[in-house]
Protein backbone atom coordinates (compact mmCIF):
# COMPACT_ATOMS: atom_id res chain seq x y z
CA UNK A 1 0.00 0.00 0.00
CA UNK A 2 1.36 3.41 -0.99
CA UNK A 3 0.48 6.71 0.70
CA UNK A 4 -1.57 7.64 -2.36
CA UNK A 5 -3.80 4.61 -1.72
CA UNK A 6 -4.84 6.22 1.58
CA UNK A 7 -5.84 9.54 0.00
CA UNK A 8 -9.35 10.34 1.17
CA UNK A 9 -9.81 6.89 2.74
CA UNK A 10 -10.28 8.39 6.21
CA UNK A 11 -12.09 11.49 7.43
CA UNK A 12 -12.28 13.62 10.57
CA UNK A 13 -15.94 13.62 11.61
CA UNK A 14 -15.98 15.19 15.08
CA UNK A 15 -14.06 17.91 16.93
CA UNK A 16 -14.20 19.35 20.44
CA UNK A 17 -12.40 21.80 22.72
CA UNK A 18 -12.64 22.44 26.46
CA UNK A 19 -11.01 24.52 29.17
CA UNK A 20 -9.24 26.82 26.72
CA UNK A 21 -7.68 29.88 28.32
CA UNK A 22 -7.97 29.20 32.03
CA UNK A 23 -9.48 26.07 33.56
CA UNK A 24 -9.02 26.88 37.23
CA UNK A 25 -9.77 24.07 39.64
CA UNK A 26 -9.74 21.43 36.93
CA UNK A 27 -7.09 18.88 35.97
CA UNK A 28 -5.67 18.27 32.52
CA UNK A 29 -7.38 14.89 32.43
CA UNK A 30 -10.75 16.41 33.28
CA UNK A 31 -10.64 18.91 30.44
CA UNK A 32 -9.26 16.25 28.06
CA UNK A 33 -12.27 14.09 28.90
CA UNK A 34 -14.67 16.97 28.26
CA UNK A 35 -13.10 17.78 24.89
CA UNK A 36 -13.19 14.08 24.00
CA UNK A 37 -16.88 13.74 24.90
CA UNK A 38 -17.67 16.82 22.82
CA UNK A 39 -15.74 15.48 19.82
CA UNK A 40 -17.38 12.06 20.01
CA UNK A 41 -20.84 13.61 20.33
CA UNK A 42 -20.05 15.99 17.45
CA UNK A 43 -19.28 12.90 15.35
CA UNK A 44 -22.67 11.41 16.19
CA UNK A 45 -21.02 8.54 18.06
CA UNK A 46 -20.87 7.32 21.65
CA UNK A 47 -17.76 6.71 23.70
CA UNK A 48 -18.28 2.94 23.64
CA UNK A 49 -17.93 3.09 19.84
CA UNK A 50 -14.37 4.47 20.13
CA UNK A 51 -11.97 1.56 19.65
CA UNK A 52 -8.83 3.48 18.75
CA UNK A 53 -6.87 6.11 20.70
CA UNK A 54 -3.99 8.45 19.87
CA UNK A 55 -2.73 10.79 22.58
CA UNK A 56 0.46 12.23 24.06
CA UNK A 57 1.56 14.47 26.91
CA UNK A 58 4.76 16.02 28.18
CA UNK A 59 3.65 15.39 31.77
CA UNK A 60 3.57 11.58 31.71
CA UNK A 61 5.63 8.89 30.01
CA UNK A 62 2.65 6.49 29.96
CA UNK A 63 -0.09 9.04 29.36
CA UNK A 64 -1.99 6.79 26.98
CA UNK A 65 -2.62 4.27 29.75
CA UNK A 66 -4.09 6.93 32.01
CA UNK A 67 -6.37 8.24 29.24
CA UNK A 68 -7.64 4.73 28.46
CA UNK A 69 -8.42 4.20 32.13
CA UNK A 70 -10.04 7.60 32.72
CA UNK A 71 -12.24 7.47 29.62
CA UNK A 72 -13.17 3.82 30.20
CA UNK A 73 -12.00 2.74 26.74
CA UNK A 74 -11.06 -0.74 25.50
CA UNK A 75 -9.10 0.26 22.38
CA UNK A 76 -7.93 -2.17 19.74
CA UNK A 77 -5.45 0.44 18.49
CA UNK A 78 -3.31 2.78 20.60
CA UNK A 79 -0.63 5.29 19.57
CA UNK A 80 1.01 7.42 22.24
CA UNK A 81 4.04 8.53 20.23
CA UNK A 82 5.37 11.77 21.67
CA UNK A 83 7.31 14.06 19.31
CA UNK A 84 6.26 17.39 20.78
CA UNK A 85 3.52 19.70 19.56
CA UNK A 86 3.34 18.07 16.14
CA UNK A 87 2.27 14.74 17.69
CA UNK A 88 -1.43 15.27 17.04
CA UNK A 89 -0.86 15.91 13.34
CA UNK A 90 1.59 12.99 13.11
CA UNK A 91 -0.98 10.70 14.78
CA UNK A 92 -3.11 10.87 11.63
CA UNK A 93 -0.99 8.45 9.60
CA UNK A 94 -0.90 5.52 12.05
CA UNK A 95 -4.60 6.10 12.72
CA UNK A 96 -5.30 6.01 8.97
CA UNK A 97 -3.36 2.77 8.61
CA UNK A 98 -5.20 1.19 11.54
CA UNK A 99 -8.58 2.23 10.16
CA UNK A 100 -7.80 1.21 6.59
CA UNK A 101 -6.60 -2.23 7.73
CA UNK A 102 -9.73 -2.82 9.80
CA UNK A 103 -7.78 -2.90 13.05
CA UNK A 104 -10.31 -0.45 14.49
CA UNK A 105 -13.34 1.56 13.40
CA UNK A 106 -13.18 4.94 15.20
CA UNK A 107 -10.04 6.67 16.50
CA UNK A 108 -10.09 9.43 19.11
CA UNK A 109 -7.10 11.81 19.01
CA UNK A 110 -6.96 13.93 22.18
CA UNK A 111 -4.81 16.21 24.33
CA UNK A 112 -5.20 18.27 27.47
CA UNK A 113 -3.02 20.52 29.60
CA UNK A 114 -3.50 22.97 32.45
CA UNK A 115 -0.12 24.55 31.92
CA UNK A 116 -1.37 28.02 32.88
CA UNK A 117 -3.21 27.36 36.14
CA UNK A 118 -1.66 24.14 37.49
CA UNK A 119 0.61 24.45 40.51
CA UNK A 120 3.96 23.15 39.32
CA UNK A 121 7.61 23.63 40.19
CA UNK A 122 9.00 24.71 36.83
CA UNK A 123 12.59 24.82 38.08
CA UNK A 124 12.37 21.23 39.32
CA UNK A 125 10.84 20.09 36.04
CA UNK A 126 13.62 21.82 34.12
CA UNK A 127 16.27 20.05 36.22
CA UNK A 128 14.58 16.67 35.78
CA UNK A 129 14.30 17.06 32.03
CA UNK A 130 17.97 17.94 31.74
CA UNK A 131 18.81 14.68 33.53
CA UNK A 132 16.38 12.55 31.51
CA UNK A 133 16.91 14.27 28.16
CA UNK A 134 20.36 15.86 28.16
CA UNK A 135 21.37 18.32 25.46
CA UNK A 136 25.16 17.92 25.71
CA UNK A 137 26.04 20.64 23.23
CA UNK A 138 23.64 23.21 24.69
CA UNK A 139 23.10 22.66 28.42
CA UNK A 140 26.55 24.00 29.43
CA UNK A 141 25.44 27.42 28.16
CA UNK A 142 22.23 27.33 30.25
CA UNK A 143 19.76 28.33 27.53
CA UNK A 144 16.08 29.01 28.23
CA UNK A 145 14.41 26.25 26.22
CA UNK A 146 12.68 26.39 23.86
CA UNK A 147 12.78 30.19 23.59
CA UNK A 148 16.55 30.51 23.11
CA UNK A 149 16.51 28.05 20.22
CA UNK A 150 13.78 29.86 18.30
CA UNK A 151 15.52 33.18 18.90
CA UNK A 152 18.67 31.67 17.38
CA UNK A 153 16.74 30.65 14.25
CA UNK A 154 15.15 34.09 14.03
CA UNK A 155 18.50 35.83 14.36
CA UNK A 156 19.99 33.68 11.61
CA UNK A 157 17.06 34.37 9.26
CA UNK A 158 17.48 38.09 9.91
CA UNK A 159 21.21 37.92 9.24
CA UNK A 160 20.93 35.78 6.12
CA UNK A 161 17.90 37.34 4.43
CA UNK A 162 17.54 40.80 5.90
CA UNK A 163 14.35 39.92 7.76
CA UNK A 164 13.44 42.64 10.26
CA UNK A 165 11.86 42.74 13.67
CA UNK A 166 9.03 44.74 12.14
CA UNK A 167 8.33 41.89 9.72
CA UNK A 168 8.25 39.39 12.59
CA UNK A 169 5.84 41.72 14.37
CA UNK A 170 3.47 41.61 11.38
CA UNK A 171 3.01 37.88 12.06
CA UNK A 172 1.85 38.59 15.61
CA UNK A 173 -0.43 41.41 14.47
CA UNK A 174 -2.07 39.25 11.79
CA UNK A 175 -2.69 36.50 14.34
CA UNK A 176 -4.29 39.02 16.71
CA UNK A 177 -6.51 40.36 13.93
CA UNK A 178 -7.83 36.83 13.36
CA UNK A 179 -8.22 36.31 17.12
CA UNK A 180 -10.37 39.42 17.36
CA UNK A 181 -12.84 37.62 15.06
CA UNK A 182 -12.83 34.51 17.27
CA UNK A 183 -14.87 34.62 20.50
CA UNK A 184 -12.90 31.61 21.83
CA UNK A 185 -9.50 33.32 21.54
CA UNK A 186 -7.70 34.08 24.79
CA UNK A 187 -6.22 37.43 23.74
CA UNK A 188 -8.46 39.72 21.68
CA UNK A 189 -7.20 43.21 22.54
CA UNK A 190 -5.94 45.37 19.65
CA UNK A 191 -2.27 44.87 18.79
CA UNK A 192 -0.04 46.95 16.50
CA UNK A 193 3.45 46.49 15.12
CA UNK A 194 4.58 49.26 17.48
CA UNK A 195 3.06 47.35 20.42
CA UNK A 196 5.01 44.21 19.51
CA UNK A 197 8.28 46.10 19.13
CA UNK A 198 7.78 47.88 22.44
CA UNK A 199 6.89 44.73 24.38
CA UNK A 200 9.33 43.06 26.75
CA UNK A 201 12.33 41.43 25.10
CA UNK A 202 12.55 37.81 26.25
CA UNK A 203 15.29 36.42 24.00
CA UNK A 204 16.75 38.75 21.41
CA UNK A 205 15.31 39.26 18.77
CA UNK A 206 12.02 37.84 20.14
CA UNK A 207 9.72 39.80 22.44
CA UNK A 208 6.96 38.42 24.61
CA UNK A 209 4.48 39.24 21.82
CA UNK A 210 6.61 37.26 19.36
CA UNK A 211 6.06 34.27 21.65
CA UNK A 212 3.12 31.94 22.08
CA UNK A 213 0.65 32.15 24.91
CA UNK A 214 0.75 30.00 28.03
CA UNK A 215 -2.83 28.78 28.48
CA UNK A 216 -4.86 25.81 29.59
CA UNK A 217 -6.80 23.86 27.01
CA UNK A 218 -7.89 20.51 25.65
CA UNK A 219 -8.78 19.43 22.14
CA UNK A 220 -9.92 16.25 20.43
CA UNK A 221 -10.98 14.93 17.05
CA UNK A 222 -12.47 11.66 15.78
CA UNK A 223 -11.41 9.76 12.64
CA UNK A 224 -13.37 7.04 10.80
CA UNK A 225 -13.22 5.41 7.37
CA UNK A 226 -14.67 7.49 4.54
CA UNK A 227 -17.51 5.07 3.80
CA UNK A 228 -18.76 5.43 7.37
CA UNK A 229 -18.17 9.18 7.45
CA UNK A 230 -20.81 9.76 4.78
CA UNK A 231 -23.52 8.45 7.13
CA UNK A 232 -22.59 10.61 10.13
CA UNK A 233 -24.24 13.98 10.89
CA UNK A 234 -21.30 16.34 10.30
CA UNK A 235 -19.72 17.15 6.95
CA UNK A 236 -16.47 15.12 6.89
CA UNK A 237 -13.02 16.62 6.46
CA UNK A 238 -11.14 14.03 4.42
CA UNK A 239 -7.45 13.41 5.06
CA UNK A 240 -5.90 13.76 1.60
CA UNK A 241 -2.25 13.86 2.64
CA UNK A 242 -0.14 13.42 5.76
CA UNK A 243 3.60 13.14 6.35
CA UNK A 244 6.09 13.63 9.16
CA UNK A 245 9.80 14.45 8.94
CA UNK A 246 12.41 14.76 11.69
CA UNK A 247 15.98 15.90 11.04
CA UNK A 248 17.31 16.72 14.50
CA UNK A 249 16.42 17.22 18.16
CA UNK A 250 18.78 19.87 19.52
CA UNK A 251 18.80 23.20 17.67
CA UNK A 252 22.61 22.92 17.61
CA UNK A 253 22.22 19.82 15.39
CA UNK A 254 19.89 21.54 12.91
CA UNK A 255 21.55 21.32 9.47
CA UNK A 256 20.45 24.83 8.46
CA UNK A 257 18.78 27.20 10.91
CA UNK A 258 16.66 28.67 8.12
CA UNK A 259 15.37 25.39 6.61
CA UNK A 260 13.13 23.03 8.58
CA UNK A 261 12.02 19.47 7.90
CA UNK A 262 8.70 20.98 6.81
CA UNK A 263 10.34 21.12 3.38
CA UNK A 264 10.20 17.32 3.39
CA UNK A 265 6.92 16.68 5.24
CA UNK A 266 5.18 19.25 3.05
CA UNK A 267 6.51 17.77 -0.18
CA UNK A 268 5.38 14.26 0.77
CA UNK A 269 1.96 15.46 1.95
CA UNK A 270 1.44 17.36 -1.32
CA UNK A 271 2.44 14.28 -3.32
CA UNK A 272 0.00 12.08 -1.42
CA UNK A 273 -2.83 14.60 -1.80
CA UNK A 274 -2.06 15.38 -5.44
CA UNK A 275 -2.16 19.13 -4.83
CA UNK A 276 0.31 21.99 -4.44
CA UNK A 277 0.62 25.24 -2.49
CA UNK A 278 -1.42 27.18 -5.06
CA UNK A 279 -4.42 24.90 -4.41
CA UNK A 280 -4.61 25.54 -0.65
CA UNK A 281 -7.42 27.79 0.59
CA UNK A 282 -6.49 28.13 4.26
CA UNK A 283 -3.35 27.44 6.33
CA UNK A 284 -3.15 26.50 9.99
CA UNK A 285 0.53 26.69 10.99
CA UNK A 286 2.08 25.96 14.37
CA UNK A 287 3.13 29.48 15.39
CA UNK A 288 4.88 28.93 18.71
CA UNK A 289 6.95 31.99 17.76
CA UNK A 290 6.65 34.50 14.95
CA UNK A 291 9.70 33.04 13.19
CA UNK A 292 7.83 29.73 12.82
CA UNK A 293 5.26 31.23 10.50
CA UNK A 294 7.94 32.74 8.25
CA UNK A 295 9.93 29.50 8.06
CA UNK A 296 6.89 27.36 7.32
CA UNK A 297 5.52 29.72 4.67
CA UNK A 298 8.84 29.30 2.88
CA UNK A 299 9.44 25.60 3.47
CA UNK A 300 5.88 24.66 2.49
CA UNK A 301 6.21 26.53 -0.80
CA UNK A 302 4.04 29.61 -0.29
CA UNK A 303 6.90 32.00 -0.99
CA UNK A 304 10.61 31.66 -1.87
CA UNK A 305 13.19 31.09 0.85
CA UNK A 306 14.05 34.38 2.51
CA UNK A 307 10.96 36.20 1.18
CA UNK A 308 8.44 35.46 3.94
CA UNK A 309 9.20 38.65 5.87
CA UNK A 310 8.36 40.83 2.89
CA UNK A 311 5.36 38.61 2.11
CA UNK A 312 3.70 39.10 5.52
CA UNK A 313 4.39 42.82 5.91
CA UNK A 314 1.98 43.47 3.04
CA UNK A 315 -0.90 41.96 5.02
CA UNK A 316 -1.07 38.76 2.97
CA UNK A 317 -1.78 36.48 5.95
CA UNK A 318 -4.14 38.83 7.84
CA UNK A 319 -7.94 38.94 7.45
CA UNK A 320 -8.67 40.17 3.94
CA UNK A 321 -5.24 39.11 2.69
CA UNK A 322 -4.45 36.76 -0.16
CA UNK A 323 -3.54 33.79 2.07
CA UNK A 324 -5.56 33.16 5.26
CA UNK A 325 -3.16 31.88 7.93
CA UNK A 326 -3.98 30.83 11.51
CA UNK A 327 -7.59 31.89 11.31
CA UNK A 328 -8.36 31.13 14.96
CA UNK A 329 -5.63 33.50 16.17
CA UNK A 330 -2.95 30.84 16.41
CA UNK A 331 -0.77 29.94 19.34
CA UNK A 332 0.20 33.60 19.50
CA UNK A 333 -3.29 34.87 20.38
CA UNK A 334 -5.85 32.05 20.61
CA UNK A 335 -4.62 29.11 22.70
CA UNK A 336 -1.34 27.35 23.45
CA UNK A 337 -1.36 24.85 26.34
CA UNK A 338 2.14 23.47 25.89
CA UNK A 339 1.40 21.60 22.65
CA UNK A 340 -0.78 23.07 19.93
CA UNK A 341 -1.11 20.58 17.07
CA UNK A 342 -4.60 19.38 17.94
CA UNK A 343 -6.02 22.92 17.85
CA UNK A 344 -4.82 23.74 14.34
CA UNK A 345 -6.45 20.51 13.19
CA UNK A 346 -9.74 21.47 14.84
CA UNK A 347 -9.67 24.92 13.25
CA UNK A 348 -9.02 23.45 9.81
CA UNK A 349 -11.98 21.09 10.16
CA UNK A 350 -14.22 23.95 11.26
CA UNK A 351 -13.13 26.05 8.29
CA UNK A 352 -13.90 23.22 5.86
CA UNK A 353 -17.33 22.86 7.46
CA UNK A 354 -17.99 26.57 6.99
CA UNK A 355 -18.59 26.85 10.73
CA UNK A 356 -16.24 29.70 11.73
CA UNK A 357 -18.63 32.62 11.77
CA UNK A 358 -17.03 36.02 11.30
CA UNK A 359 -13.60 34.55 10.55
CA UNK A 360 -14.85 32.04 7.98
CA UNK A 361 -12.79 31.85 4.78
CA UNK A 362 -15.13 31.90 1.79
CA UNK A 363 -14.95 28.85 -0.43
CA UNK A 364 -12.56 26.88 1.81
CA UNK A 365 -12.25 23.38 0.35
CA UNK A 366 -8.56 22.58 0.96
CA UNK A 367 -6.80 23.24 4.27
CA UNK A 368 -3.17 22.67 5.14
CA UNK A 369 -2.33 21.91 8.77
CA UNK A 370 1.29 22.00 9.85
CA UNK A 371 2.54 20.91 13.26
CA UNK A 372 5.92 21.61 14.84
CA UNK A 373 7.56 19.94 17.83
CA UNK A 374 10.63 20.44 19.98
CA UNK A 375 13.00 23.13 18.73
CA UNK A 376 11.95 23.11 15.07
CA UNK A 377 12.67 19.39 15.43
CA UNK A 378 9.59 17.40 14.33
CA UNK A 379 7.47 18.58 11.42
CA UNK A 380 4.10 17.09 10.44
CA UNK A 381 1.95 18.25 7.55
CA UNK A 382 -1.64 17.27 6.80
CA UNK A 383 -3.88 18.30 3.91
CA UNK A 384 -7.62 18.10 4.57
CA UNK A 385 -10.40 18.55 2.05
CA UNK A 386 -14.15 18.59 1.59
CA UNK A 387 -16.00 15.97 -0.48
CA UNK A 388 -15.55 18.22 -3.52
CA UNK A 389 -11.79 17.55 -3.40
CA UNK A 390 -12.00 13.75 -3.52
Image (spheres, helix red, strand yellow):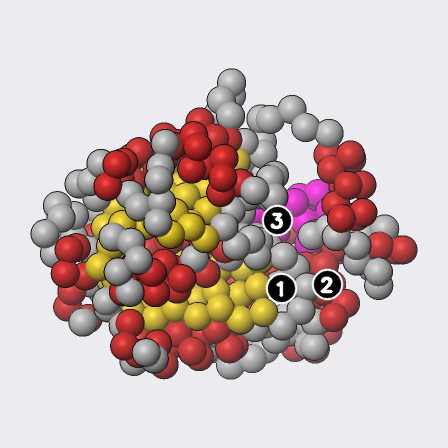
Q: Is residue 196 left or right of residue 36?
A: right
Q: Position of residue 212 (x, y in %)?
A: 57, 47
Disc 1: which residue? 377
User: Which residue position holds label 2?
Assistant: 250
Task: Tell me, yes or no, if residue 123 can be seen here.
Answer: yes
Q: Position of residue 253 (x, y in %)?
A: 74, 70
Q: Which mark's residue is nearer the viewer, 2 or 3?
A: 2
Which circle's residue, 2 or 3, is located before the other in the chain?
A: 3
Whether tag 1 and tag 3 are in contact, CB under 8 A, the answer is no
Q: Could you say where residue 82 lies in the image, as x and y percent from the top left? A: 56, 53
Specify few, some or many for label 3: CA neighbours under 10 Å numbering under 14, 14-19, or 20 or more: many
Task: Give the alpha-carbon distance from disc 1 to disc 2, as whole Å.
Answer: 7 Å
Could you say which quadrant of the image residue 321 lies in? bottom left
Q: Residues within 10 Å of mark 2 (few under 14, many from 20)?
A: some
Q: Who's the residue at 39% across and 64% down the image?
A: 93
Q: Earlier in the sequence, mark 1 or mark 3?
A: 3
**In whole angstroms, how far apart are the C-alphas of marks 1 and 3?**
17 Å
Q: Identify the mark at residue 211; answer none if there is no mark.
A: 3
Which numbered disc flags the more N-terminal residue, 1 or 2?
2
The front one of 179 and 259 is 259
Relative image position of residue 241 (x, y in whole percent): 34, 71
Label count reads 3
Q: Is residue 117 above or below residue 240?
A: above
Amino acid sequence: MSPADLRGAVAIVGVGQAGCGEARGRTEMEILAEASRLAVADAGLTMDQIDGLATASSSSAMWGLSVVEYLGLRPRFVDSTMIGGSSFVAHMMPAMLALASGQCDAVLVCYGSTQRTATINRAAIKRARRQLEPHPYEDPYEPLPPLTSYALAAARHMHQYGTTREQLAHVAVAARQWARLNPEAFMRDPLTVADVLASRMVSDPLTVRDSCLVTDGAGAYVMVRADRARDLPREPAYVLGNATAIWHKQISAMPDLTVTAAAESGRRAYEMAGVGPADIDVLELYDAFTINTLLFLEDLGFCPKGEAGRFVEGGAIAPGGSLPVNTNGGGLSCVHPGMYGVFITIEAVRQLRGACGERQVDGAHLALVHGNGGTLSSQSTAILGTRETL
